[in-house]
Amino acid sequence: MAPPFSNSNALLFFFLILPTVLLGSNLYNDFDLTWGGDQRAKILGGGELLSLSLDRLSGAGFQSKKDYLFGRIDMQIKLVAGNSAGTVTAYYLSSQGASHDEIDFEFLGNVSGEPYIMHTNVYTQGKGNREQQFYLWFDPTANFHTYSVVWKPWHVIFLVDNSPVRVFRNAESLGVPFPKEQRMKIYSSLWNADDWATRGGLVKTDWSKAPFTAYYRNFKAQECTGSCMSAGAEAWQNQKELDAYTRRRLRWVQRNFMIYNYCTDQNRFPQGFPPECTQS
Ligand SMILES: *[C@@H]1O[C@H](CO)[C@@H](O)[C@H](O)[C@H]1NC(C)=O
């Protein structure tokens, strides 16, 4: 009689699939696999785990079935392990069209043992150029970690394991458009970007290590309506002003792990920084 699992399937089951069965969430209901074919984009374990793979021929991607306007979106991701240099795992919210809004995480891989870069950006009405980059305070390939977006009419907060890493405040009073009218879907893709991601293309993707695989689980989307939209509700993420703990945590991340901030890049903005920079 054939064993139900090969050894590697058994490992996958116990370490990746079983924990998500216990925690719930069915990715079949939430996402469509949109790119890479069924070999590269897969939902496993009855809907508990999603994987994207990249090889020499193609990357892979998925998108949410639903779109959202304000709320909190959480996803646990385990990034490509080992020599991931040249790979980029993009995870973002975006609306459609030329003047789209977008809230971006992009994870730039690295050679074994060297740190990933977490790149973030915010587009409003088709215009981005608001990059901030960070190292992480853990190895994002060893375990799943939670990457979240809290999107309210008065700010967008990027969180990693519930620590705020970036706040983009509503600066409409300064003439800066804020994402507040266009519904956004959630997208992710894993692709090869060795022409720019690795210090301007210095390090090339090592295809002998392909396929490169990233894993996703425990997706949670709480679209915000009713009382969730009123400022001053219980949870800190509903307050317009960050509380003391959140401000401290944000400062800690920015002081120790931020490696690029467009708001301090004098060379790029010799005529003066974008207006929203006075608020962050
Ligand atoms: C890769 O590691 C090097 C050396 O630690 C670091 O300078 C670089 O920022 C890391 N990330 C990328 C994407 O190159």
Image (spheres, rainbow, N blue to C red):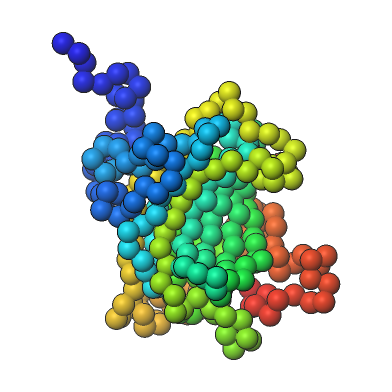
Q: Position of residue 78 (x, y in %)?
A: 45, 41
Instruction: In the displayed orientation, state which residue is furthest to the left.
Output: 1
**Quadrant that contains the N terminus:** top left
At horizontal 66% and vertical 66% (from top left) the residue drawn is: 129
Q: Position of residue 16 (x, y in %)?
A: 34, 35
Is residue 184 visible to the viewer in this orientation of the structure? Answer: yes
Is residue 136 visible to the viewer in this orientation of the structure? Answer: no
At horizontal 57% and vertical 45% (from top left) the residue drawn is: 88
Residue 182 picture quarter? bottom left
Residue in front for this viewpoint, 251 or 41: 41
Q: Position of residue 80 (x, y in %)?
A: 51, 37
Residue in front for this viewpoint, 10 or 29: 29
Q: Is residue 219 above or below residue 168?
A: above
At horizontal 34% and vertical 29% (from top left) the residue drawn is: 12
Judged left or right of residue 49, residue 111 is right
At horizontal 70% and vertical 65% (from top left) the residue drawn is: 262
Q: Is residue 203 above or below residue 96?
A: above
